[in-house]
Image (cartoon, grey):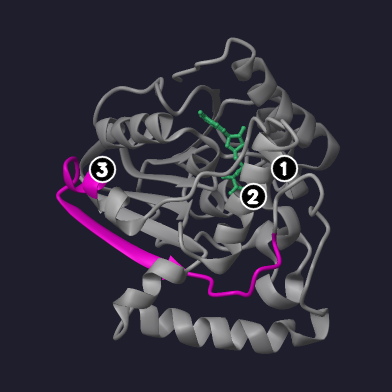
Amino acid sequence: MIVKDKHFFNDYIKVWDNGAVKDAPFITLGLEAVLTDYYGNLLDAPPPFAVKTDEQILDLGCGWGRVLKPVRSITRNTVGLDISQQMLIAAKNHCNYHHLPTPLVGGDGTSLPFKDNTFDTVYSLLVLQHLSKDNGKKVIKEIHRVLKPGGAAYIRVPSRFAPENLLMSFLQIISINVFRYKDPIRMRFYRIGEIKKICNSLFSDVEITAHEFRPPWNFHTPWTWHYIIIPRRYHKRLRAISDAIEKKANTTMPWLKHFAVTLMIKAVK
Ligand SMILES: C[S@@+](CC[C@H](N)C(=O)[O-])C[C@H]1O[C@@H](n2cnc3c(N)ncnc32)[C@H](O)[C@@H]1O
């Protein structure tokens, strides 16, 4: 990992380690973990991509095993990798609790401890957003390296122009520049153009789909962790509206993709 400040790396790991011990679902998902009327049960949801039983699969940044466990229940050949030892302990407990023991590896996504052409599928959800753009590029290059030819990567990143993300960027700017608060896991947002630029130079086929057109309620700053603007009774209705916009964005109105909260990159080697 490229680290400019010598204390940064320890602080970065400490956030994930402490988060894993204190409240693993909350450090990984934030409010999405509890707003079940809107999101459904994300703590035990099927993977957001197709999984075949005979594939070799890597979960890069597996956290406490939220997605790893459902994937492992489909195929045995699943490996979880994470930079945080405490997250790996949580993932081990989670998978074992469900009688799905899973190989887990400590490592850094910017320098994967696997040989070239090892996996049919590599997925990385909610990880790149916490890394610098330079490190994010390194992770994508590493994913490409360890994928078999024809293998597919699924990478979820937050999009630059969603109202919620613009607001969060603004709050982060204030917290860094005014309050001098350096959040080691602060969010990075991606434009569709920059994703294409990185991925098109590596992969043979790149498809970006847009997800979540929700109103701004999920701010990850120290002051707003628990803050929800929209009353819960409207969440189901808002979900239906979000799903309708999402459908249009991914079919007839692709310009809407820019305003999604998250983008899913499917990149085939
Ligand atoms: C927000 S959590 C997401 C966990 C999981 N992917 C999920 O969706 O539930 C981010 C995870 O990425 C891990 N992580 C962060 N930087 C990493 C890196 N450079 N290499 C590997 N894992 C990393 C963190 O330790 C943490 O477990």
Helix, strand or loop for disc 1: helix
148 versus 9 height, above or below = below
Q: Which residue is mark 1?
A: 94
Q: Give the side of residue 29 with respect to residue 230, left or right.
A: left
Counting residues from the start of the chain, the first of labels 3 and 1 encountered is: 1
Instruction: Tell me the quarter of the image containing the C terminus.
Output: top left
In which quadrant of this rendering is ligand 1 seen? top right
User: Measured from the top left, where is residue 150 in percent x and y?
Assistant: 19, 48
| Residue under the image location 67 percent in, 42 percent down | 95
Confirm if mark 3 falls within 8 A of ligand 1.
no
Q: Which residue is mark 3?
A: 198
Amino acid type shown at disc 1 = His
**Nearer to me, 213 or 83:** 213
**Nearer to me, 40 or 99:** 40
182 versus 62 height, above or below = above
**Nearer to me, 179 or 10:** 179
Q: Residues within 10 Å of mark 3 (few under 14, many from 20)?
A: some
Q: Which residue is mark 2?
A: 66
What range is drawn magenta here? 197-218
Counting residues from the start of the chain, the first of labels 1 and 2 encountered is: 2
Helix, strand or loop for disc 3: helix
Q: Give the side of residue 147 with respect to residue 191, left or right.
A: left
Q: Residues within 10 Å of mark 1 (few under 14, many from 20)?
A: some
**Nearer to me, 243 or 131:** 131
Amino acid type shown at disc 3 = Ile
Tell me the distance, in whole angstroms, between the alpha carbons under discs 3 and 1: 34 Å
91 versus 217 height, above or below = above
Extreme top residue here?
6
Amino acid type shown at disc 2 = Arg
| Residue under the image location 41 percent in, 59 percent down | 264
The answer to the question of whether label 1 and label 2 lie on touching residues, with beta carbons closer than 8 A, is: yes
